[in-house]
Every structure is written in structure tokens, then in C-alpha cells.
Image (cartoon, rainbow, N blue to C red):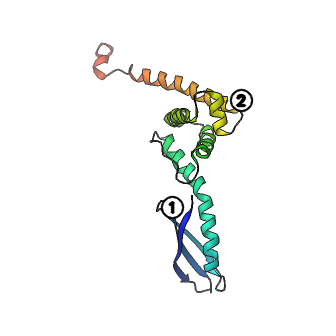
Amino acid sequence: MPIVSSEIKKVVNKHNGNRAIYEQHIDHIGNAHAHRYQTDAVFDIDAALITNAVWVESTLPTKEIADDAGVYKTGGAEHTPDHQLQADYDRVMLRELMMEEDAQAFGNTLPFFRAFEVRAGSNANARANYLGVPKSEYDLVALRYNQITGLISGMDADRGRVWELASFEGWL
């Protein structure tokens, strides 16, 4: 989704003849994205502004995935993507989440997976087609989420078995 405006915010001349360039790029929803770089005195920073806007725009989907994955791993609410199509976001997000090694962090992403299932179709074939991946690979994702669901249920049940101090009176 596009960068709609770009500007050079500041040029700082360095003692060695180089310049530090500070750009700001605004995306279609009004978020500002800073880009800074250094160059020599003869470099055409106005022409670079256009190229850099394209580069900043190309980084937004990856940044969105990284930011949202961090939120989901801590139990945060699902976010509708701003910089990519929902199906692309879901595919890349699931790939990212499947690389999580920490079972607790992975378990925290279960609400995202359940919401994905609702929007992606009523069965594994439909969901694999939605993602554009082989069903056998989608089945691995679904299996891991089904297994973590069982673990989470067990951990929730265990929390109910924790004794209060008063429960230990006969043990003191």
C-alpha cells in the first residue's frame, strides 16, 4: 500500500564534505516513516528521494509482519493489515509464527490462528487454497495449533489446582 508523500526534512553538512540526509515518507494511512542516510556533496538527494520512497514502501509489509508477530506472541489482539492483502499477510504471518520455538509464545498466537480459520474457509482444503500452499503443508500448521490447544487447556486446568496458603494448614 503506497507512500503518498515524501520530503527531505533536514540536510546536515559534515566537516568532511559529506551530508547527512533525513527524509520522511508518509503512507496511505498517515503514518510517517523516517529514512536517514549519508552521502557526498554532489549526490542528487532529490532524485534519491523518489528511489528511497519506493524502497521504504517495499519494507512496510515485512515490518508489519514483524511488529504484529511480536504482539500476537504476547497475547495481543489481531490487527488488520495495512500494507498487504489479507491472504498474503496470513500466509507470511503463519510462516513467521511457525518458526517460534517458545511454546508459551506460540500458544499466545492461537487467537490469530482461530480468526484466520474463520476467514480462510470451512475446511483444510479451502484454507490451503486461500493461502496458496500445498494442503500437506497447511496440515502441519493445523496440527501444531491443535496440539498447542491441548497443552493450553492442560495449563489452564493446572492453574485451578494451585493451593492457597490456607490449604497448607495441615501440612505445616
Extreme residue toward the top, this view = 170
Question: Residue 81: percent from the left, percent from the top?
Answer: 53, 49
- Looking at the image, residue 44 sits to the left or right of residue 23; the answer is right
Residue topped by disc 2: 136
Gap between marks 2 and 1, in whole Å?
37 Å
- Quadrant containing the C terminus in the rendered view: top left
Residue topped by disc 1: 28
The amino acid sitting under disc 2 is Ser
The amino acid sitting under disc 1 is His
Please give the count of numbered marks on the rendered protein.
2
The answer to which quarter of the image holds residue 91 is: top right
- Looking at the image, residue 79 sits to the left or right of residue 162; the answer is right
The one of 97 and 32 positioned closer to us in this rendering: 32
> Is 65 situated above or below 120?
below
Question: Which of the marked residues, 2 or 1, is nearer the chain's N terminus?
Answer: 1
At 66% from the left and 34% from the top, the residue drawn is: 128
Q: Which of the labelled discs sits on residue 66, or is there none?
A: none
- Quadrant containing the N terminus in the rendered view: bottom right
- Looking at the image, residue 163 sits to the left or right of residue 142; the answer is left
Crowding near pointer 2: few (<14 within 10 Å), some, many (20+)? few
At 58% from the left and 35% from the top, the residue drawn is: 120
Question: Residue 79: percent from the left, percent from the top?
Answer: 48, 46
Crowding near pointer 1: few (<14 within 10 Å), some, many (20+)? few
